[in-house]
Image (cartoon, rainbow, N blue to C red):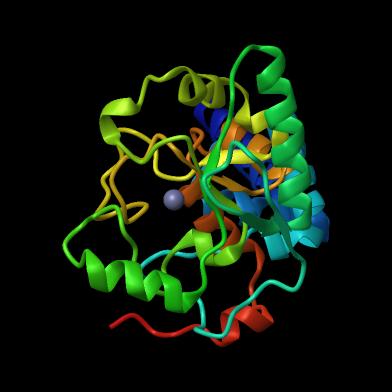
Amino acid sequence: MKSCWIYSCLGLLFAGAAVLVYIATESSTPQEKEQNRLIQCAGLHLSDRERNIFYNAILSLKERRDWLILVDPQHRLPADYKPNDLTVQFHPHWPKKAQLRQEAFEQMNLMAEAAKKDGITLIPISTYRTWKYQKMLKDRKPDNPYVARAGESQHHLGTAVDFNTVNPSDENIPPLAWLRKHAGEYGFSLSFPKGKDAEKESGYPYEAWHYRYITRKAVQLQDDFFDGDQHKTLTFLYNCVFNTPSETESKRILPN
Ligand SMILES: [Zn+2]
């Protein structure tokens, strides 16, 4: 009689639990479902508070897709890609003219002013490059792992800058140390960080001088949820958030 009572209780408990699970699953709103999908797609485990921060960060980036195009050996830009808001500037201390998309330029100038106040001179030694120019660079140095093939360079986007040097032994010169600390405050992110598998991840070895403007909000998402890894962040956005190719992406050239 007693065991019979215990079995009834257990039965009721299981039934109750099943109903609760059912209610929890069925009552999730479309927003909660979308949150779950994004978190799963990113491979993250987040607290309730983090889930909201993550989701809101992504929502705020949907309008900024143009700044978040994934470019690497598997995701090549079309040869005729040219941003329509390129701005040119000359400066007596720069080795050549600098050319960047307008917002990236404005942020770079603000960053350079802030660096100046700390006694640091930032010099953009390489900025926008056309397909043709990149091809010429690669043809000249086909075995140099630092030089991307045409269509695979972030410089083609008009949002990437090499600052002060392209010599790997200069990684600790003051301008590069300053950038590691402050570039994110201006929306710039180190594209090819130290310790990444160049073959499997970003596609290139450590480049302490190469920064890409991805907006401040994207840097925040990168730092808060993707270990400060730009390639991981942009890959996530490409695969999980922007589900259909943009106009530029639809003209991509397949890897060969
Ligand atoms: Zn570069």
89 or 1, nearer to the observer:
89
The residue sitting at the front extreme is 92
The residue at 67%/35% (across/down) is: 220
Q: Residue at x 51, y 60 (%)?
A: 155
Q: Residue at x 62, y 24 (%)?
A: 182
Residue 256 position within the rendered picture, expressed as x and y whole percent measured from the top left: 28, 83
Total labels: the figure holds 0
Res. 230 in view = yes
> Going by the image, does 13 lie left or right of 132?
right
Left or right, 102 with respect to 238, comes to right
Choose top left, top right, bottom left or bottom right for residue 225.
top right
Q: Is residue 22 visible?
A: no
Q: Position of residue 57 (x, y in %)?
A: 75, 44
Q: Is residue 213 above or below residue 130?
A: above
Residue found at x 55% / y 54%: 127
- Depth order, front residue of 246/191: 191
Picture layout, residue 222 above or below residue 155: above
The single residue placed furthest to the top in the displayed view is 118
Q: Does residue 151 appear left or right of residue 39 in this picture? A: left
| On-image quarter of the N terminus | top right
User: How far across and how far down the image is residue 239, in percent?
Assistant: 54, 65
Q: To which quarter of the image does residue 81 belong?
A: bottom right
Q: Between residue 28 and residue 178, name the one nearer to us.
A: 178
In this view, 197 is above or below 256: above
Spot occupied by residue 217 in the image (x, y as percentages of width and height): 73, 41
Q: Quadrant of residue 144?
A: bottom left
